[in-house]
Image: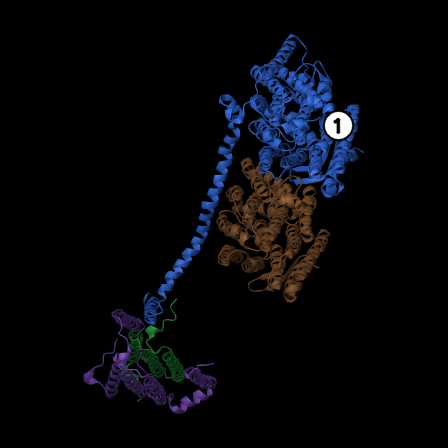
Amino acid sequence: MNVSTILIILLIGAFATYFSGDKLASKVALLFSLAALGCSIVLLNNYNAGENISVINSWITQPKISFALNADGLGLAMVLLTAALTPIIIFSSFGNEYKNAKAFYGLILFMAFAMTGTFLASDGLLYYIFWELALVPIYFIALIWGNGDAEERRKAVVKFFIYTLAGSLFMLTAFIYLYTKAGSFLIEDLYKLNLSAFEQFWIFLAFFLAYAIKIPIIPFHTWQANVYQKAPTVGTMLLSGIMLKMGLYSVLRWQLPLAPTAAKEYMYIFIALGIAGVIYGSIVALRQKDLKKLLAYSSLAHVGLIAAASYTLTLDGLRGAVLQMIAHGFVVVGLFFAAEVIFRRYETRNIAEMGGIRAQSPKFTSMFLILVLASVALPSTFNFVGEFTVLYSLSQINIWFAILGGTTIILGAYYMLRMFQHVMLGETNSKAFADVTLNEGISFAVIIAVLLFFGFYPKPITDLITPSLETILQVINKN
Amino acid sequence: MDTNLALILVLTPLLGFLVNVFFGKSLGKTASGAIGTVAVAISFVVSLLLFNQITSTGKGIQVTLFDWIQISNLKINLGFLLDQLSVLWLLFVTGIGSLIHLYSISYMHDDENMHKFFAYLNLFVFFMITLVIGSNLLVLFIGWEGVGLCSYLLIGFWHKNQDYNDAAKKAFIMNRIGDLGLLIGMFIIGSMFSTLDYATLKTAITGATNLNLPLLSLAALCLFIGACGKSAQIPLYTWLPDAMAGPTPVSALIHAATMVTAGIFMVTRLNFVFDLAHDVQNVIAIIGAITSLVAATIGLVQTDIKKVLAYSTVSQLGLMFLALGFGAYEVAVFHVITHAFFKACLFLGSGSVIHGLHGEQDMRNMGGLRKAMPITFWTMLISSLAISGVPFFSGFFSKDEILLTAFHHSIPLYVVGSVASIMTAFYMFRLMFLTFFKEFRGTEEQKHHLHESGSLITIPLIILAILATFGGLISLPGNSWLNHYLAPLFTKVAGEEHHLGTTEYTLMGVAVLGGLLGILIAYIKYFKQDNFPESDENITGLSKVLYNKYYVDEVYDAVFVQPINSLSKFFRDYIETGLSALVFGLGKVTNEIAFQGKRLQSGSIGLYLFVFVLGMCAIISYIFLAQ
Amino acid sequence: MGNILNQIGIENYIFLSVVLFCIGIFGVLYRRNAIIVFMSIEIMLNAVNLLFVAFSTYHQDAQGQVFVFFSMAVAAAEVAVGLAILVSIFRNIGSISIDNLKNLKG
Amino acid sequence: MIHIPDFAHATTVQVIFCFLAFITVITAFLTIFSRNPIHSAIYLVICFFSIAGHYLLLNSQFLAVVHIIVYSGAIMILFLFTIMLMNLNEQREVHRPRITRLGAIVSFCLILIVLITIFINSKPIVGEYDSTGEDFQSIKVLGKILLDEYMVPFEFASILLLVAMIGTVLLSKKEKLNK
């Protein structure tokens, strides 16, 4: 058994879901995503037992492209994140009715397939294919099942699609250039390259453009808020929970080791960009009227911090980044789900039209509050572990980075609590708010359990990712 | 055994929290209150056991549970340190906590969400215990932020009122500003010494030869900013008066007795760091003195009974920091303890008054309650005497120690502290006179319902009043049990005890006279002359400035909050749209080029052919003629 | 008769066909009547055919002529189809001026 | 290098060539310039005949015959039929803007100059034409080549013609109005 099993399960799942018909689709999708989760857990066990779970097969001989899936700790951690979030996301959508559900759930599974592939691929071109493949389902999900005015939605989604596609074209160029140098797309061969500083600079920049748009880092974020707002919540969860992490993961896996000299030389600029994103995102989030948009900007702030940590090129920075990625993945899915739960009852995302929910639905309030607190990195949640590590690594580079990045804990608290106050507290709302259903409660409970458990005991994840991060650092520091 | 004890200590309140959260509603009000109280009481008993053990062995207990966060040069355990300081703190946290829980059973009985109230209180105690017994700074930080969270939850307990929610939010955010300072301080210390563990840190610092003192001072300053946030010092004090929006037991427990002293606990805990940073110590002393004075002046004119107490708390905390600034940690700790007794008593007393008046908090509408509420009156009187520094009550000893220390280090700060003390005496007795003497000024209906509160409320009051009276005995001048008890914590030769000489007696006399003077002025003004505070519109001049708290909230709002909000608006309306337009601009340019190109495609075949011929000519010429 | 090119010279044939070809181009550009345009195209084709034959004689090789034969076949087919298209266009829009055929306009 | 015919000593062949070339060029021009499409068609026929004459001059009788049959016969008939079918006359053609004509003349001159310059510039033809005397272009030989060496293309040409025929029929068939 190797990692391709997960991919196969997800791909078969996607088709099976499509052919199972609208009524069964959601359940079949859930089943397959759970199977993928189970499979990845088994693989994790095998990996921990020292078994080789990677695959390398020759695919195209000329040019030399291999079907290479390499699972190290980092990749596995991200795969687990995907595998864990996908069932939650699918399950969370059970309260909604979708037209043409078979296509909808099929696309979700297909997207999970592509994203898992991105996390596993260790051949440049294969990686690129998965990377772009992941874009297609979310495009359709956002376009067809999104909300709001169809014309505006189309505009936002097409912008997102073209923007990210354009960004990744630069990455493709970089890969082709690297291929001409190395004669192979395999990551090991690419790692061995010794490029001049000039070449590295351009490669670094090309990768950066692709990832900065995907992550997004300011000023490349303009697609984000609109798409998050327009996409159906499931799409938003997929985007913010997993797809953003594709960009961040790729920074660690591809960008930094392939252009280490450039990374070292320009790291301050990119850390500064990331931190600018933190402050900017937090400040913009303060005055958002739309709940999903607010969460989108908070996401911008958080990933800015993660990106900044990645560019520190220290073990702490990378480790913090990965921890925070996972934590953020869970918390942001939870928060968007909360927005969806409110939407199901109030049919609005406008914060001004909410309020007084706490008086009617204490259970939901508690869950939402925990998620809000996790999002602002209250100690004892997983996010704190990540954020502490991240900020610590930044403080090792320059204390000002930590101070400026740390404003997220102030501004974050400000906008999140302000949002919480206006959404949940206050006089009882005239509109009735039914308490969470069992299904919704389960989704929340799973997310909260994960956040709290790893908040106190992050060691399993740390142990999993540390060796592979050390390998990456070795590549970075080989000269 | 120790591990189990520690776990029982910590987890019982957590268990109480969980039970109350999940089953509180079905259990009923009394049961949930009882569960909450018992949970804290068990912790108190455990604390007593631990105290017993510590006093007999004299050694701290270190408990390590498991690895928590791994950072390359730091390994942070989730562990507990039970030594003299933490156990002392535990005693009054759980002790007063139990009393206040008991009090709350009656006080909150009319509230529909009583089980939640107890859940939050229990959660608070859990986090407070974590804060106190954490073996390293990061575990302290769990508690530190956790108590901030509970404070947020409890200030906004009546969540339907958005003003209360604003107050809660404000408290949380101001605390977070301090928390950032604390985090940065931790980062500096962590990178300097590769540890956040108190014990290791202490050996590292005391053993180190060439320390980077400026950096260490910076760390100390950052830590102090954290303490400022939690313990409501200038410039981060404005949340505490607003926090009075919460139910009165909360004000007593969190915003008077325990949470706000966390800053003092942290500074005391890290005394070895602060001892090396003299500049920072001076800053602490000055800020403490200024805070005590500013808060006291504001307290002079407040009319809300809880606001008076809140500013008095800020002022007293300022005094404690004054002591900390001089390195007199044991003195500060002493005042923390006595203050916890009398201020909790005062708050609970005011709660009793408010309870009796069905929510009335304005002193202008009180008066003459002495007869209706004798127990409340007497206990509050005792506490007021204690806080005013009347001899032989507990406050007298602790405050006197602080002023004595200040006198030895800096005369100006001593003067500031003394003036603040005189003011304290004045406004406390102003409160007493306005509330309990003269005729009742409220409505007839309130008058009709006036009654002494029930025994669940009065018993904690009586116990606290007794403690407020005799609490000073633990550190009598010249023969201080507390100093000996705490001695192992401090690097300095502990207890450079003030030998009671002429100076000391003179100072004591001055302090007593000052206190009596304050009481006298209050007596003349509010008892003899029959003054009572004007209604809001008629307040003029300096008192208006004071009544409006020096307009600090307004200034903060104008200087920090509004700019950030308008910046946010600006970003949202201009930068965001601008950036978006930039990206769309690229698309538009492409579109425009395509549009122009489209016009080139006129559909006129003649033109196409013409261009085609021209192009062919060019190509042929290039191929055949260019060489 | 074997020495025609000795008497005339291959370059004269070249010039003739160049001139013919250019006349064809000129016609295509000059006229708007699709049928005349078609005729011009035929002239161009013939110019090329002529050159083929001339060179076939020059090289003493029949392949050029074979090619011309095929090109004639293709030309026949082309004209047949092209005229049919013209007819149907004429039937649809009532004119065969190529100015009216602007469906390619972007 | 331009072989300027010496009219005084021109051989018969040269005279014939000049005559044919003159007719070819003039009729080609007239084809384009005449306003009446039928006249154009007639001039084109003459042009084709003169080209057939060139073929004969070059001693390729087979092609000359085929040319007359295909072009002057079949294709021209098609043209004429089409013209008559459409009932075209000179009034139907809209007035052309001056710019079009100017463009046409410019490109005509340009391509003519360019092509002629190329041929003048290119390598001069060295040596006189030398006949081997071998028969390479009689109908007999061409027939053998066509049906032997070029058998398959020949067959494909027939298929092409068939397809063209079907296509033409389909295209020119009147669409039924009510499908």
Q: Colour of chain C?
A: green
The disc labelled 1 sits on which kind of residue?
Answer: Ser
- Residue A145 horizontal/vertical position (percent): 56, 59
Which of the chains bears the disc numbered 1? Answer: B
B232 and D98: which one is in front?
A: B232
The quarter of the image holding the N terminus of chain B is: top right
> Which residue carries the number 1 mark?
B455
- Residue B2 horizontal/vertical position (percent): 79, 33
Q: Residue furthest right?
A: B1
Local crowd at mark 1 within 10 Å, few (<14), some, or many (≥20)?
A: few
Q: Chain A is drawn in which colour?
A: brown
Number of numbered discs: 1
A28 and D57: which one is in front?
A: A28
Regarding residue A5, the answer to whether it shows in the image is: no
Color scheme of the displayed model: by chain
Q: Residue furthest left?
A: D8
- Residue B52 horizontal/vertical position (percent): 79, 25
- Residue B142 horizontal/vertical position (percent): 66, 36
Q: Colour of chain D?
A: purple
The quarter of the image holding the C terminus of chain B is: bottom left
Please say if B522 is above or below C27. above
Tell me the quarter of the picture where residue B387 sits.
top right
Regarding residue B530, the answer to whether it shows in the image is: yes
B526 and B550: which one is in front?
A: B526
Q: Which chain is blue?
A: B
Q: What element carries label 1?
A: helix
Q: Residue furthest bottom?
A: D140
Please say if B414 is above or below A388. above
| Residue C102 as seen in the image, left or right of residue B256 | left
Tell me the quarter of the picture where residue C105 sits.
bottom left
